[in-house]
């Protein structure tokens, strides 16, 4: 009988752990409250006058340091799922044709139940049971929590208080992101700007990424300090203020957007606890995520990879 496993969260950490454990003979169910995979690597789809627009509104790119992650990126590149993005730097990669493309591929391979928000976890003599508004799931022999630290601390408070305490010590920085479609090109504007102002930290022409449509879609991201001071803004006001800041940095030369939308990433940038991953043999529960290493896409992958290796001995058969 195969070991059964539940994973909460279909970001890169959860999908990496799930994919690796499926290959080792585990039966894995993955749950995510969102409509699709990606987490902070997600891509937003919008329609304007019959035209489809795609915005990478979370992580803009990633870099590679670890040799194991480098091997994975090489595989993704051969599959056409990632490519270098020179405009962001000599070591920058992005998903193709969307930032979330590697995660879409992983989600299809592992199978994910989207639109299911897990609100509670209970362990009894039969194993782990997950509680959601869609009903209960389980029992499972083991469980993995692969969500931001602030959310993990709440979910684990009763079933694994020591792990919850580790998560509670991590404080993520927020980020307001604004998606902008301009009515016409902006010749002379750099494709990527690492802004220095108090409002904006990043301005990028999404179409300069490999495999993207040749449109006038842009992504603005705020500084952590401005986002923290403006958490209560509605998304229309946040977008308007960020566009005004962009216009100011561009000397006032900015056409009125044909489309704009703000999005708050409340847990955008993790601090990094240094643990790598968490695992309890006695409770048969683990935790993975970038916040256990550092604020990088690579860190999320490594955390899921390392947790899966730690759990490999649990497999009871095929």
Image (cartoon, rainbow, N blue to C red):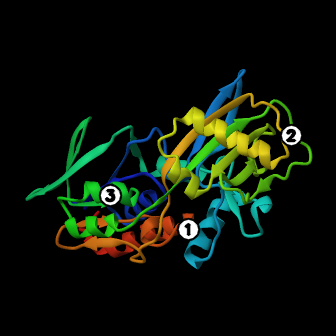
Compare marks 1 and 2 and give the one earlier in the sequence: 2
Between 313 and 40, the one lying in front of the other is 40
Left or right: residue 253 versus residue 197 is right
User: Extreme right residue here?
Assistant: 188
Between 285 and 246, the one lying in front of the other is 246
Q: CA distance from mark 3 to mark 1?
A: 20 Å
Say which residue appears at 56% left-offset and 57% top-offset. 225
Q: Given this view, does label 2 or label 3 mark the residue nearer the observer?
A: 2
Q: CA distance from mark 2 to mark 3?
A: 44 Å
Tag 2's secondary structure?
loop
Instruction: Identify the residue under disc 3.
Output: 152
Instruction: Identify the residue under disc 2.
Output: 253
Tag 3's secondary structure?
helix
Instruction: Relative to 264, say whether 83 is above or below.
Output: below
Say which residue appears at 66% left-offset and 55% top-offset. 198
Compare marks 3 and 1 and give the one earlier in the sequence: 3
Left or right: residue 5 versus residue 128 is right
Say which residue appears at 82% left-offset and 38% top-offset. 254
Between 128 and 194, the one lying in front of the other is 194
Q: Given this view, does label 3 or label 1 mark the residue nearer the observer?
A: 3
Rendered image quadrant of residue 131: top left
Instruction: Give how far across and how far down residue 69 sits, in percent.
Output: 57, 71
Which quadrant of the rendered structure holds the N terminus? bottom left
* Res 38 visible: no
Instruction: Identify the residue under disc 1.
Output: 298
Q: CA distance from mark 1 to mark 2?
A: 37 Å
Say which residue appears at 63% left-offset and 42% top-offset. 178
């Amino acid at each position: 009988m195969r070991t059964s496993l539940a994973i909460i969260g279909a970001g890169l950490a959860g999908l990496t752990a799930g994919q690796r454990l499926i290959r080792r003979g585990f039966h894995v169910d993955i749950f995510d409250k969102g409509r699709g995979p990606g987490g902070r690597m997600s891509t937003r789809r919008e329609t304007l006058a019959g035209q489809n627009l795609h915005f990478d509104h979370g992580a803009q790119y990633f870099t590679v340091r670890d040799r194991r992650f480098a091997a994975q990126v090489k595989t993704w590149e051969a599959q056409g799922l990632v490519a270098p993005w020179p405009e962001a730097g000599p070591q920058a990669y992005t998903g193709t044709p969307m930032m979330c493309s590697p995660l879409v591929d992983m989600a299809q391979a592992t199978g994910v139940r989207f639109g299911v928000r897990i609100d509670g976890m209970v362990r009894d003599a039969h194993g782990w049971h997950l509680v959601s508004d869609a009903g209960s799931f389980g029992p499972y022999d083991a469980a993995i929590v692969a969500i931001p630290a602030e959310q993990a601390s709440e979910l684990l408070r009763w079933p694994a208080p020591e792990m919850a305490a580790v998560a509670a010590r991590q404080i993520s920085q927020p980020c307001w992101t604004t998606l902008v479609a301009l009515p016409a090109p902006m010749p002379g504007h750099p494709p990527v700007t690492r802004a220095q102002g108090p409002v904006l930290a990043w301005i990028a022409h999404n179409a300069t990424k490999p495999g993207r449509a040749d449109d006038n879609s842009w992504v603005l991201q705020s500084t952590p300090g401005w986002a923290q001071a403006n958490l209560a803004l509605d998304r229309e006001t946040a977008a308007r203020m960020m566009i005004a800041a962009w216009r100011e940095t561009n000397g006032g030369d900015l056409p009125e957007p044909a489309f704009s939308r703000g999005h708050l990433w409340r847990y955008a940038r993790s601090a990094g606890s240094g643990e790598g991953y968490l695992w309890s043999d006695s409770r048969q529960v683990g935790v993975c995520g970038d916040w256990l290493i550092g604020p990088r896409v690579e860190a999320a992958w490594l955390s899921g990879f390392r947790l899966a290796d730690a759990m490999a001995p649990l497999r009871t058969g095929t």
